[in-house]
Image (spheres, rainbow, N blue to C red):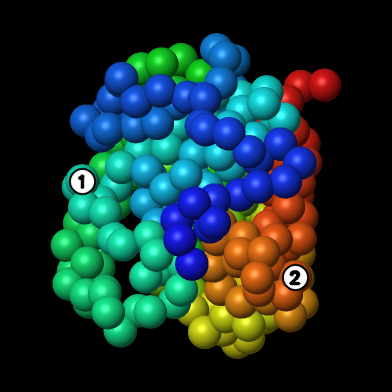
Amino acid sequence: MSVSKCCIQGFSWQGTPTGHTNSKLATNNVYITGTNPDIAILFIADLFGWSFPNVRLLADHYAREVGANVYVPDFFGGEILDFNLIAEEKFDQLDLPGFIGRNGREQREGEIFACARALKQELGYKKVGAVGYCYGGWASFRLGGKEHEQEDGSDQLVDCISIGHPSLLTKTDIDEIAVPVQILAPEIDAAYSAELKSYTFETLQRLKVPFDYQHFPGVVHGCLVRGDEDKPGERAAMVRGKDAAVWWFRRWLKDD
């Protein structure tokens, strides 16, 4: 599959991303799209990274349909994996252990927290959401952790999160969540196992955190960003996932 074929097409996906990359968020290079000075969404990308066209087109959709400024930072230190190899799931041809070793939780968590803090504390956004796919899943849970909550319940780093096919997620991440959570879960997903899915569902109920759990039958890990029209049901799942996230962010970030 070529990169051009992998890019989202149909409804309003044709064309090129409309945002810009001439600013930084905290110390990270960032793609920015949108015009709302009050509402921001921090988009934490999967292995495709911040420069993948689908990621930026998704960000444009969130900006337009939610009515928010969307920030997609580079959390991989400028490293870009081969788009085609990821899209075709040829992971044996990628040095994933080395990549995760350079860009894992310990290496990047501080940058991710700093970017979220910058949105409220430096840029003055009143409401901030986080959306994370695959790699971005654990990071979004960490952003919504109760460790960031002040005694009066205010000043969380983010006000809500939406997660698609998370990886590197732990039970402790789930135990610590303190903001509304949306889970977009493909049926076939070794990274987000049936056992961890069940744990998520049961724990969020126990914690009494508002949540939305959506099951995507017949599709696999990565579908919500890849959107390959040649894989049965994948393009439709991607559209459904985008629509669900838009609804979730409008519910928790908008006053109307």
Q: Residue at horizontal 26%, vertical 54%?
A: 80
Tell me which amino acid carries mark 2: Gly
Q: Residue at x 65, y 70 (%)?
A: 230
Work out whether 231 lies above or below 149. Answer: below
Q: Residue at x 27, y 32 (%)?
A: 29
Q: Are marks 1 and 2 in contact (CB under 8 Å)?
A: no
Rate crowding at label 1 as few (under 14), some (14 to 19) or many (20 or more) other CA atoms within 10 Å.
few
Question: On the image, which quarter does residue 192 sit in?
Answer: bottom right
x and y percentages locating residue 146 in the rendered image: 49, 50
Looking at the rendered structure, the secondary structure element under dot 1 is: loop
Residue 47 shown left or right of residue 166 in the figure? left
Residue receiving disc 2 = 233
Q: Amino acid at mark 1?
A: Gly
Left or right position of 3 against 198: left
Residue at position x 25%, y 68% from top? 100
Query: 205 above or below 38?
Result: below
| 26 to the left or right of 129 | left
Badge number at residue 188: none
**Which residue is the site of mark 1?**
78
44, 6: nearer the viewer:
6
Q: Which one is nearer the viewer's eye here, 91 or 99? A: 91
